[in-house]
Amino acid sequence: MIRTMLYRPDTREIATGGEEQLDAWTAQPDAVVWADFSDHPPEDEHRILAGRFGLHPLAIQDAQRARHQPKIEAFPGHAFILLKGLGPDREDFAFETIQIAMFVGERFFVTRHSGPSPSIDRLWQSAKEDRPHFANGPDALALRLARISVDRYLKRLLTLEPRLEDLEQEIVARPRDEVLAEVMGYKTDLRKFRRVLRYHVQVFRELLEEPPPQVRAERIHEVKDVYEHQERASSLATLYYEVAADLIEGYISLASHRLNNIMKILTIVTAIFVPLSFLAGVYGMNFEYMPELKSHTGYFVLLGVMGAIAAVLLMVFWRKRWL
């Protein structure tokens, strides 16, 4: 599917449609168009991108690849920015990334995404209602889209902080396997978050240090703003990843501590019953002559000795603070 939004500076009008608007855009030298591609046939998509907009074949190839790391590259006539956006919101923290390709020219802004993109839909709706988005140029649209995208990352990350705090309290109060499984799931997701956001930081660092001609000098503050938000999101992802790792280590430490306490109790019980078992074994041997067996008080004396041994051992363990 291809949808287009055409802006005419002379009348300050915005029209939405499909591929048919590209003819009107070509006929008007001052018009600006935004073409958004999603689930479009690759061959037809390549024809439009190369024929209508003159995009470089390598940039089109990278945009159409199923998986490609975020990047920025300057080509004659346009800049190419590839980012990873978040898919539709979910109730849980799990997420799906969507590859978002942006082509920024003097008179055009082209986006191509591999699936439904809430960030692009939000900018599309905003651009229809707010003409200054187009009046500021295609580079402003690209930076606005990047800002919306990183804000969604930040929002998702910030929702995780209170849950991690709750999990920490649950681990201290009562470590359970379900809690460990949840924390490990968060750690896996945060590792992906961190990797993606590190790429984004690198992309906007390059954009800040060496902006292509299509990103005008007056946009430097917006570039810096997006870069700072990407850095913040990357820092939060790293922080929460380390928190999740610490929670896992804490869970394992607490579980080991509880296991050690159980083993200590069992060892103490075993240590007490070793001498008692020895006495029981001695007087349980089948010898004909054992004087104590003929004594009327032998049984009670033996029980008393066993009790005394157990009491002495318990006192020793208590003094050594093993109990």
Image: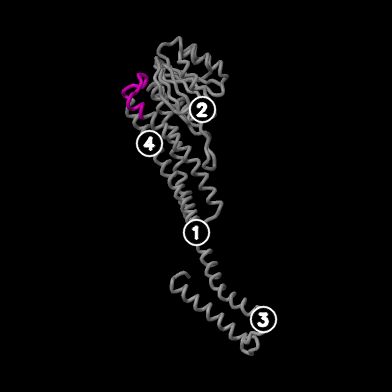
Toward the bottom, the furthest residue is 296
Residue identified by numbered label 1: 173
As shown in the figure, which amino acid type bears the numbered disc 2?
Answer: Arg
Q: CA distance from mark 3 to mark 1?
A: 56 Å
Q: CA distance from mark 2 to mark 3?
A: 84 Å
Q: Residue 76, labelled with which disc?
A: none
Q: Nearer the viewer, mark 3 or mark 1?
A: 3
Question: Where is residue 313 shown, x and y percent of the image?
Answer: 50, 75
Mark closer to the chain start, 3 or 1: 1
- Element at label 1: helix
- Element at label 3: loop
Which region shows up in magenta? Answer: 205-218
Toward the top, the furthest residue is 27
Mark closer to the chain start, 1 or 4: 1
Q: CA distance from mark 4 to mark 2?
A: 23 Å
Q: Would residue 211 be found to the left or right of residue 254 on screen?
A: left
- Camera sees residue 15: no
Residue at the spot 54% in from the left edge and 42% down from the top edge:
91
Q: Nearer the viewer, residue 70 or 38?
A: 70
Query: Do the residues under discs 4 and 2 have CB atoms within 8 angstroms?
Result: no
Residue identified by numbered label 3: 287
Mark closer to the chain start, 2 or 1: 2
Other-residue count near label 3 (Cα within 10 Å), few / some / many at <14 / 14–19 / ≥20: few
